[in-house]
Amino acid sequence: MSPSEVPDAIDPDVDLHVPAQRAETAGAHKWQVLAAISAGGAAGASARYGAELLWPVRDGSFPWATFGVNVLGCALIGVLMVLVGEGGRWARPLVRPFLGVGVLGGFTTFSTYALDFRNLLEHGRAGLATAYAGGTLAAALTAVWLAASATRGARRAVRRAVVG
């Protein structure tokens, strides 16, 4: 079964229960995958660090940089998973490990999100901390859904334009 044949799979190319899909990390090929993830992770983490430098947060204030990075990263993950997970020319062996796991995995951050939440609580900002926690979750999930839906719509429009 190919990744495009897996119904409603979120990321079908990493289902290790399917022998054909274990090939990505099997044998000597695993070093290519790890190198792609590492290079992508360095790029993504560097971009996140740059965002934190551009929009630093004062103790006890809303962490806009982390919020923005996580929401943007989730939107980009939605786009990427449609392009990679639903076939087409983006479905190449090292695209998902490099961009998805590496770049976007290094760009988005749960650890900083958790530290920001704790920082708000430590500064007596429980309401803001709760809004940040819930708002990030809602915005990130909405971003993934909207970006994936928009990407699917754009792909359909391009196909109609090419065929029609």
Image (cartoon, rainbow, N blue to C red):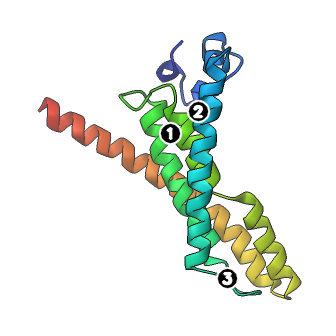
The reply to whether the C-beta atoms of the residues labelled 1 and 2 are less than 8 Å apart is yes
Which residue is painted at 61% across and 39% down in the image?
Answer: 37
How far apart are the alpha carbons under marks 1 and 2? 7 Å
| Percent x, y of residue 56 | 63, 81
Q: Residues within 10 Å of mark 3 (few under 14, many from 20)?
A: some
Q: Give whichever of discs 3 and 2 has the lower sequence position.
A: 2
What residue did someone put label 1 on?
Answer: 81
Residue 146 drawn above or below residue 65: above
Report the disc number at residue 57.
Answer: 3
Q: Residues within 10 Å of mark 2 (few under 14, many from 20)?
A: some
Residue 42 drawn above or below residue 67: above
| Percent x, y of residue 21 | 61, 17
Q: Which image quadrant is residue 49 in?
A: bottom right
Task: Specify the amino acid type for callout 2.
Answer: Asp
What residue did someone put label 2 on?
Answer: 11
Q: Residues within 10 Å of mark 1 (few under 14, many from 20)?
A: many
Q: Indicate the quadrant containing the N terminus: top left, top right, bottom left or bottom right.
A: top right
Q: Give whichever of discs 3 and 1 has the lower sequence position.
A: 3
Left or right position of 94 against 151: right
Report the disc number at residue 150.
Answer: none
Left or right position of 139 against 156: right
Give the SS element for disc 1.
helix
